[in-house]
Image: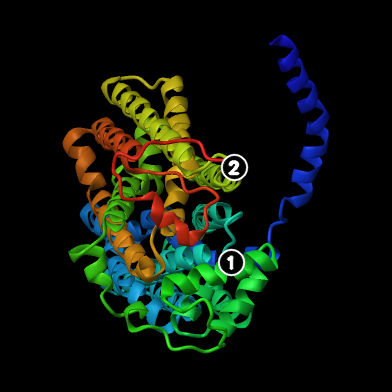
Amino acid sequence: MGGRNDDISATSGLRSPLIKPLRRAHKPRRNSFALLCAVIASMASVLVGYDLGVMSGAVIFIKDDFKISDVQVEVLVGVINLYAIVGAAAAGRTSDWIGRRYTIVLASGFLFVGAVLMGFAPNYAFLMFGRFFAGAGMGFAPLIASVYTVEVSPASSRGCFSTFPEVFVNFGILLGYISNYAFSKLPVHLGWRFMLGIGLFPSVFLAAVAILIMPESPRWLILQGRVGEAKKVLIRTSDSIEESLKRLADIKKVVGIPASCEDDVVQVPKQSSYGSGVWKELFLHPTAAVRHIMITVVGLHFFLESTGMDAVVLYSPRIFEKAGISSSDHKLLATAAVGLTKTLSVLIATFLFDRIGRRPLILTSVAGKTISLIILGTTLTIIEKSDERMTWTVGLCIAMVLSDVAFYSIGMGPMCYVSSEFLPLKLRARGVSVGLIINRLSGAVVTMTFLSLYRAITIGGAFFLYAGIALVGWAFFYVVFPETRGMDLENVEGLFGNLLWKFSDRE
C-alpha cells in the first residue's frame, strides 16, 4: 500500500514540472482592445463619482452663499438620486433602442448640460434645475457602463473589467474631494461654481471618444440581426478566434438564430426583439431562474445603498466634525482620505474578482462593513456623551470611516456592476434598469434623511441602524448569491433557480 503511494507521489513529482509550464503557456493574455472598450465605457462613471464627491464640500459653500437651511441642503444633496431614477428608468429601453454606444453619448450630453447649468446657477431653484440634468445622466451612465462592459468582455476577464465602472466612480469621488480642497480658497460665490462646473470637460471628451473608438456591443448587434458586424467585434474582443466563434454561437442560440445560418444580416425572431414581452418575463411570468436573478439583483442594489455608504461619502465632513475635527482644511483633507481609500480598495478588487470569485468577496465585504459601522457608531456615541475631547476616539472614528469605505469597495460597490452578468441577454438592460431604480431610490432615502435621522436618534444611532441593515444583508447574500467566476455569459442563468443555493468550489 505504501509502495503504491510512493509510486503515485513519484509519478506526480515527475509530471508536475511539465504540467505547470503547459498551463502557463496556454493561459490567454488579457485582450487589450476589450480592455480599452471597458475603460472608455466606464469613464462615464467618473462624472457620477465626481458629483458625489464634490457635493460633499460644495454644499458647505452653497449653504453660505444662498443662505439655505439644513433641510434644503438634504434636498439638494439627495434629490439627484430621485432624478437619477428617471434616467435609469429610461436608460434600459433607450439602450435597447439606439444601442449601447449612443446611449453613452446621450449620458454624456445630460452630464454636460447639468454641469453647465449648476456652474452658472443664480439661485437655489436654478441649481435644482441643473441637478435634474445631472441626475438623469447619473441614471444613464452606470447602467450603460455596466451592460456594455459585461457584453464586450471575454469570460476570462469579465469580473475584472466589470469592476471598472466602480473604479472610475471612486476615482471621480477622489477628484471631487481634491476639487473641493483646490477651489476652497476662492471667494464663496465662485468656489462652488468651479467645483460643479468643471465637470463639463470630461463629458465632452467621453462623448467624442465613444463615437470615434468604441464599437457597438456585439450582443446588441446580434439582437438587431447584424451578425457580420457582431462577429468582427467578437474577434477583436475575445482571447482567441476559437473563443469568438463560441461566443458568437452561444449568442445566436440565445437570440434564436439557427447555428447553420452564416448570413451577415438576418431576420431576428420576433420574440427576441428588444421590445416584446420583456417586462412580462421579468415580473408577470418569470421562470424560476429569472425570479431568483431579480431577487438577487434588487436585493443587492437595496443593501448597497441602505447600509449608508452615500451618507458617509456625502456627509463625511459632518461626520468628522462630530468626531471632533473643527478645522475646515482638516475636514476636507480627512474627506480626501476617504476618496483615496475607496479608490485604492476598488483597484484591489479588480484583481480579486476573477481570482477569488464573487461570492467570497461580497460576503467578506458586507461582514467587514457591518463590524466597521458598529465600531463607528459606538465611538461616536462615546464622543457625544463625553464632555472632553479624546484623541483616540477621533483617530478611531477616522479609521472606521476608512474601514467602512474600504470593505464596501472591495465587494459591494463593484458588485453593483458585475451583477449585470446574471441577467439573460434579452432581459439585461431592462433588468439592470430595475436594479438601478431601487439603488437610486434607496440612496435618495439615505441622503435626504441622514441629517434629520442623526438628530432624531443621534449620529451613533444612525450608524447602528445602518449596521443592522448590513447584518440582514449578509444573511441575504449567503442564501441567494451564487458564484459565477469564469463562466460564459450565456451560461450564467443556469446557476439560478434555487434560492437555497449551496456554495461549492469550481475549478
Most distant residue in the top direction: 2
Residue drawn at x 69%, y 57% is 30
Task: Judge from the rendering whether residue 201 lies leftward or rightward of residue 89; answer left or right.
Answer: right
Task: Judge from the rendering whether residue 304 lies leftward or rightward of residue 243; answer left or right.
Answer: left
Secondary structure type for disc 1: helix
Q: Looking at the picture, tell me which residue is in the foreground, 326 or 362.
A: 362
Location of residue 101 in the rendering, given as x and y in whole percent from the top left corner:
51, 78
Q: Identify the mark nearer the N-term, 1 or 2.
A: 1
Residue depth check, mark 1 versus mark 2: number of the one nearer the observer: 1
Task: Judge from the rendering whether residue 345 lies leftward or rightward of residue 472; answer left or right.
Answer: right
**Within the image, what quadrant is residue 417 found in?**
bottom left
Question: Which numbered disc covers residue 246?
Answer: 1
Q: In the rendered image, is residue 231 in sight?
A: yes
**Within the image, what quadrant is residue 117 found in?**
bottom left
Residue drawn at x 82%, y 38% is 18
Residue drawn at x 49%, y 70% is 251
Q: CA distance from mark 1 to mark 2?
A: 23 Å
